[in-house]
Image (spheres, helix red, strand yellow):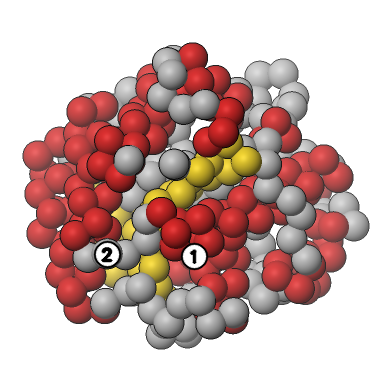
Amino acid sequence: MLKIAYDPIYAHPLPEGHRFPMLKYELIPGQLLHEGVITQDNLFSPGLPDESVITQTHDIGYWHQLRDLTLSPKEQRRTGFPLSARLVEREIRIAQGTIDGCKLASESGVAFNVAGGTHHAGSNWGEGFCLLNDQAIAANYLLNNNLSKSILIIDLDVHQGNGTAQIFENEPRVFTFSMHGANNFPYRKERSDLDIPLQDGVSDDEFLGILVNTLPQLIAQHKPDFIFYLSGVDILATDKLGKLALSKEACKARDRFVFEQCIENGIPVQVSMGGGYSPDIKDIVEAHCNTFKTAIDLYF
């Protein structure tokens, strides 16, 4: 059974007119339940991690600023969210959901987090709607508990995983791969182990061709025993921030190829959703739901 981290706290209330589509975190599980793709048994609510788990990845001073709600107004603007105790609880529950997903994926092959993919959060900063880096926290949890020796992070969100790249820049056990829009946020890029910058307007065939020619070689070369997959849907042509030109069908084919590579190589994978900013939230929800459906079709 596919296990999916979800809690109602994921859909955090934001000021009127805020551009982040927070409602998607309520609509994704709702749509999957409505279609009968999953039942309530697939969903689990993550608990709260120990602070020590967070500070194995994030600077303790930065974490205390979050915990104590003392981020400066400038730093809060950089994150894109007004800071509150409820928001911080949301972020750490998401991180725990990704940690739990790693354990579950090791049993069944794959596990999901309805939220997460907060790859712009670096060791001592938050930005771009990311306060804590859930997949980085989970990767360090695996390493520090001797649950993994070699990790591959596949980041196919339209934005570079700059925080993830910075966190692991001196960690040879984690290989960071980011395929993203060259002319998109963040405008100051970090250096992943492999960055593939894409020009504006990249088509279905070009995107998929690059992925097919890259991912199998990465797996063969680095031999990961665990994979994290950030499956952002802001690669869609409909996305108002993405600048690429991919269809929903290509987005689904991307997911299928990643999962097929994990299955063929016997590598468990944890999936976090990442971004999606199409003006019609139905486009966002459908594309995200396709990722879940593809995994269920292949694994279960």
Left or right of 55? Residue 243 is left
The image quarter containing residue 24 is top right
Viewer-nearest residue: 33 or 159: 33
The image quarter containing residue 126 is bottom right
Left or right of 250? Residue 57 is right
Check the image and report above or below for 55 versus 99: below
Figure quadrant of the N terminus:
top left
* x and y percentages locating residue 228 in the rendered image: 41, 59
Any mark on residue 266, and which? 2
Question: Callout 1 environment at 10 Å: few (<14), some (14 to 19), or many (20+)?
Answer: many
* x and y percentages locating residue 59 in the rendered image: 71, 73
> Dot 2: what SS?
loop
* x and y percentages locating residue 9 in the rendered image: 73, 35
Residue 66, visible in the rendered structure? yes
Residue 161, visible in the rendered structure? no
Check the image and report above or below for 252 versus 199: above
Figure quadrant of the C terminus:
top left
* x and y percentages locating residue 152 in the rendered image: 36, 68
Residue drawn at 45 percent across, 69 percent down: 165
Give the spatial CA distance, label 2 vs label 1: 24 Å
Tell me if label 2 and label 1 are in contact, CB under 8 Å: no
Left or right of 190? Residue 217 is left
Left or right of 221? Residue 283 is right
Residue drawn at 30 percent across, 45 percent down: 299
Residue on which the image places disc 1: 164
Check the image and report above or below for 165 versus 199: below
Residue drawn at 56 percent across, 64 percent down: 138
- Tag 1 or tag 2, which sits nearer the N-term? 1
Q: Amino acid at mark 1?
A: Thr
Viewer-nearest residue: 255 or 2: 2
Question: Callout 2 environment at 10 Å: few (<14), some (14 to 19), or many (20+)?
Answer: few
Residue drawn at 72 percent across, 27 percent down: 14
